[in-house]
Amino acid sequence: MKDSTLSRRSFLKRASWASGAATFPFVSTRNVLGTNERLNIAGIGSGGKGKADLTFCESQNIVALVDIDHQRATEMFEKFPQAKRYKDYRVMFDEMTDKIDAVTISTPDHMHFHPAIRAVHSNKHVFCQKPLTHTVWEARTLTQAAHKAGVATQMGNQGISSPKMRRDAEVVKAGALGEIKEMHCWTNRPGRYWKQGLERPKGNHPVPNHIDWDLWIGCAPWRPYNPAYHPFNWRAYWDFGTGAIGDMGCHLLNLASLTMDIRDPSKIVASGVGQTHETGPTESHIVWDFPDRPGQSAFKFHWYDGGRKPSQDLFPQAAFDTNGILMIGTDDTMLTHYSGGGELMSGRRYRDINAPRILGECEDWHQCHYDDWFNACKGGKTALSSFDKAGPITEVVLLGQVAMRAGTEIEWDASNMKVTNNKKANKYISTEYRKGWEI
């Protein structure tokens, strides 16, 4: 159904809604499950990344599968033949709210928030792929709502559960680097994975019979079907994705998430090449300034993508991989990957550092990430990347995108969720939802 009419409620009304006046009733789940009971899980997004997420959930009961493309979801339909099949997650909630305990969300970025907030307000546990949301406002709103509801949450930045990443974090937490002053993260995305620096695709293309294009567009502004978007390259387009930084930023901030209170930067400046009105740049460098706060000194975070990397002089004895993390302290520097396995510039070995095992260990770290969430759903400890952690990380990542789109340095008032030195930049903090999808 073509509909190009957009409706937008005021930001203040949205903020009021986020602080407590929910539009969905809270619905009780089953009684708290025992550790040996299985969760009833609905998979929202069952092809692509959803296939991987659901496979790691196969120890539980997969009772519903949602996907706008039933052809891409065929493998999961066959793997879980007992699960009810849907194209519209809203219909699934209408019919099965009292039959599910939790959902996984593995959709394009622009459609993370709507099913996630529906799940939270239905008192369901949520596993959501990274980045947690498409906008800063959505990240703040979803984080607050999930915290208030008390549901178990986890973002899909699986590298944070890697035993090597946990060990890197324990070494940092033990003080091996001293006070953290700088952090540098880089990725080779978009590169050969998808193209950016594009204009809107042209041409008339019939919608394949197996795709519900209206549901794929969801809350985004309407545009005709084009194979340039689905199933993968939507990542490049502002209306649907969050570019290279959205795709990899939450992964490469794993070490910071485990060791620092990385939230609420004071200012952000971005530079890039090839950005268009439609898509992100082909390469970029973004810098965030984080102020002093109790227990943590001021520091800078540098992001590079599209082949850019920090100066090799920062860690001269090791070649920088295509993706990496460099954490620079007053006493030492660590070079590592998004799933860990770091080394220290001083040459000291981890075994020579008194760094207690405070984060636990696991063997299959991909499976551990999901098991961590299952345990939280069943009354165990909070998951390692719960939305209380993942929400602020997502805000940081998306503020980089705001600065890039604004084209100027931005000063950020986190408490009031607004840019103070460039009012036009505030239009990127939230988004306009298509008629019928308003919040």
Image (tube, rainbow, N blue to C red):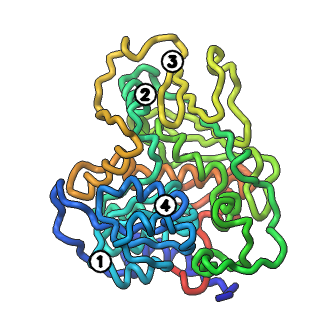
Residue drawn at (24%, 48%) of the image = 381
Q: Assign a secondary structure to mark 1.
A: loop
Q: Assign a secondary structure to mark 2.
A: helix
| Residue 146, percent from left and from top | 35, 64
Query: Where is mark 4, residue-wise?
Result: 50
Left or right: residue 412 versus residue 377 is right
The total of numbered circles placed on residues is 4
Q: Nearer the viewer, residue 74 or 275?
A: 74
Residue 401 seen by the camera: yes
Tag 2 near tag 4, CB within 8 Å:
no
Quadrant, the N terminus: bottom right
Tag 2 near tag 1, CB within 8 Å:
no
Nearer the observer: mark 2 or 4; the answer is: 4
Q: Assign a secondary structure to mark 4.
A: helix
Tag 1 near tag 3, CB within 8 Å:
no
Callout 3 environment at 10 Å: few (<14), some (14 to 19), or many (20+)? many
Between the residue at mark 4 and the residue at mark 1, the CA separation in whole angstroms equals 26 Å
Query: Where is mark 3, residue-wise?
Result: 344
Q: Looking at the picture, does residue 54 appear above or below residue 210?
A: above
Left or right: residue 193 versus residue 75 is right
Q: Which mark is residue 381?
A: none
| Residue 117, percent from left and from top | 42, 71
Q: Earlier in the sequence, mark 1 or mark 3?
A: 1
Between the residue at mark 1 and the residue at mark 3, the CA separation in whole angstroms equals 49 Å
Query: Where is mark 2, residue-wise?
Result: 168
Q: Earlier in the sequence, mark 2 or mark 1?
A: 1
Q: Amino acid at mark 3?
A: Leu
Q: Which mark is residue 26?
A: 1
| Residue 47, percent from left and from top | 52, 63
Q: Amino acid at mark 1?
A: Phe
